[in-house]
Amino acid sequence: LINKDHRAAFNNFKKASMMNNLNAINSLGVCYEEGNGVEIDHKKAVEYYMYASLKGHPLALSNRAIYQIKTNQVENNI
């Protein structure tokens, strides 16, 4: 079940991400990782974290590293 408030937030993050807002891009990663407003999709979560972290977003870098540790995906070490 997807919470309507989470869905609205997800949609707003999506719009802001189209303007290359790194906070929004990182937030989309969180949404996909946790299933906030959207179905859980770990592949998309990592893609959003990766994009934002490569652009220098520090929280996205942290989120990416934590996700890799949680899922034992440390072969692509940061």
Image (cartoon, rainbow, N blue to C red):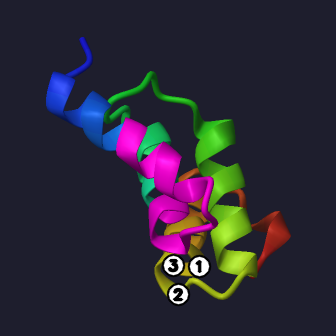
Q: Residue, x 66% and y 88% (percent of image)?
A: 56
Q: Up-down: is 63 above or below 40?
A: below
Bounds of the magenta segment: 11-26
The residue that mark 2 highlights is: 58
Secondary element at tag 2:
helix
Q: Is residue 53 magenta?
A: no
The residue that mark 3 highlights is: 62
Measured as percent of width and height from the top left, residue 67 is found at: 54, 59
Q: Given the image, on which type of amino acid does mark 1 rest?
A: Leu
Q: Given the image, on which type of amino acid does mark 2 rest?
A: Pro
Which residue occupies the foreground of this view, 29 or 14?
Answer: 14
Secondary element at tag 1:
helix
Measured as percent of width and height from the top left, residue 46 is found at: 65, 52
Mark 1–mark 2 contact, CB under 8 Å? yes
Please give left or right for residue 50 compared with residue 16 in the image.
Answer: right
Mark 3–mark 1 contact, CB under 8 Å? yes
